[in-house]
């Protein structure tokens, strides 16, 4: 989702010399393959968006995959970028790197000031290691490696599998399916009280290009909208968008995760960047994308 959005944004800006590889063409968890790619292609700029990601249940169910795959991908790419003399690298983290009970909004300096949320500490520890790799290579070798911490993302290209996805695509799909199947209820996880901030992936892609041009420092920098809402409010908005007329049933045996994750975006705003896509509009566009994709998949069979 993120890589494709960055490519769309770069192409819109007129870049035609992009070095792209699919997962099948280049396995980023394979050190030798990554090193060979960098030695041969010698990229100037690197956007490191590749990661093993998922929603709260996937994070909690597959801790080994989340820590192992992410440590591997980012270590291989960052080290090879250094060896190949890359001019600038942007590493993408996540706001789950901040302590579970950190004051809100989350400022960049809250990193490593308290315990992490247990459901995603494996992913968070890997992402914190990625930030530290960038900082270490900057300090020791003078590499211009930066890291950005986006808040919860959504948009075209997302994972809509209800078991592994994040909340917005997960609920969209559950409501879409329930309407088709004539169900009167959808099951949601937790209490509905946690608050989350959602950023459209095209806004993140703009922010990544902006930071490549305008940011060069050791500290990670937050990327968000500065606004959050409760999961119940999100679900009610999605009921309107998907036209699901049934009830919301919250399964409180499922985890809530972090109570709130609102990022402080003062730094990036002061540099001159702001998110543009309003949540309602972005969710509507994402739902249209999902429905078109489902319809095409069905008619292709
Ligand atoms: O999006 P989500 O999985 O990620 O869940 P996190 C957000 C909230 O929505 C949680 C609730 O309180 C969930 O319990 N929720 C309600 C649901 N219904 C659903 C549903 O049908 N599907 C899902 N997925 N959630 C992830 C981290 O945490 O966020 C990752 O695990 C990463 O490490 C990512 O940082 C951005 O915000 O809780």
Image (cartoon, rainbow, N blue to C red):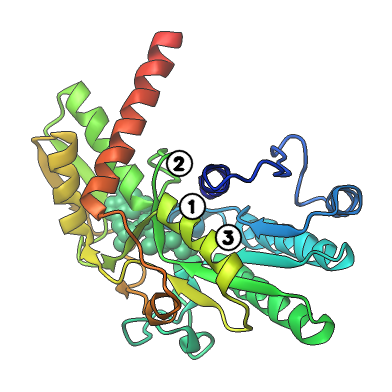
Where is residue 68? Give x, y as percent.
Answer: 69, 60
The local crowd at label 3, few if under 14, some if 14 to 19, many if 20 or more residues have their Cα within 10 Å, is: some
The yes-or-no answer for disc 1 within 8 Å of ligand 1 is: yes
Would residue 254 be seen by someone viewing this image from the given angle?
Answer: no
Where is residue 77? Give x, y as percent.
Answer: 76, 60
Q: Which residue is mark 1?
A: 54
Q: Picture quarter containing residue 192?
A: bottom left
The local crowd at label 2, few if under 14, some if 14 to 19, many if 20 or more residues have their Cα within 10 Å, is: some
Horizontal side of 32 relative to 130 (left or right) equals right
- Mark before the other along the chain sequence, 2 or 1: 1
Q: Picture quarter containing residue 265?
A: bottom left
Q: CA distance from mark 2 to mark 1?
A: 8 Å
Q: How many marks?
A: 3
Residue at figure coordinates x 39%, y 25% from the top left? 293
Q: Name the front one of labels 3 and 2.
A: 2
Q: Are marks 2 and 1 in contact (CB under 8 Å)?
A: yes
- Give the camera-side residue of 291 and 54: 291
Q: Which residue is mark 2?
A: 159
Placement of 33 over or under 183, stated as above or below: below
Q: Are marks 3 and 2 in contact (CB under 8 Å)?
A: no
């Amino acid at each position: 989702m993120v890589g494709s959005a960055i490519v769309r944004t770069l192409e819109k800006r007129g870049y035609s010399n992009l070095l792209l590889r699919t997962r099948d063409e280049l396995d980023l968890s394979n050190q030798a393959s990554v090193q060979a790619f960098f030695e041969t292609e010698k990229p100037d700029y690197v956007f490191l968006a590749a990661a093993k990601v998922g929603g709260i249940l996937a994070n909690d169910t597959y801790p080994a995959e989340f820590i192992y795959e992410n440590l591997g991908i980012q270590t291989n790419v960052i080290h090879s970028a250094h060896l190949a003399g890359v001019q600038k690298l942007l590493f993408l983290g996540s706001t789950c790197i901040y302590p579970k009970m950190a004051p809100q909004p989350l400022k960049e300096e809250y990193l490593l000031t308290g315990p992490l949320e247990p459901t995603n500490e494996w992913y968070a520890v890997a992402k914190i290691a990625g930030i530290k790799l960038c900082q270490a290579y900057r300090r020791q070798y003078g590499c211009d490696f930066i890291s950005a911490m986006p808040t919860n993302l959504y948009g075209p290209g997302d994972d809509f599998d209800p078991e592994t996805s994040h909340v917005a695509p997960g609920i969209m799909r559950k409501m879409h399916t329930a309407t088709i199947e004539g169900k009167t209820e959808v099951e949601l996880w937790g209490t509905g009280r946690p608050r989350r901030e959602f950023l459209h992936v095209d806004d993140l892609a703009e922010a990544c290009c902006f930071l490549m041009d305008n940011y060069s420092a050791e500290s990670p920098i937050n990327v968000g909208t500065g606004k959050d809402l409760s999961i119940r409010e999100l679900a009610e908005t999605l009921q309107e968008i998907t036209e699901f007329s049934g009830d919301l049933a919250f399964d409180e045996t499922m985890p809530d995760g972090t109570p709130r994750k609102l990022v402080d975006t003062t730094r990036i705003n002061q540099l001159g960047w702001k998110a543009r896509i309003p949540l309602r509009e972005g969710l509507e566009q994402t739902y249209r994308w999902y429905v078109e994709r489902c319809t095409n998949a069905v008619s292709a069979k």
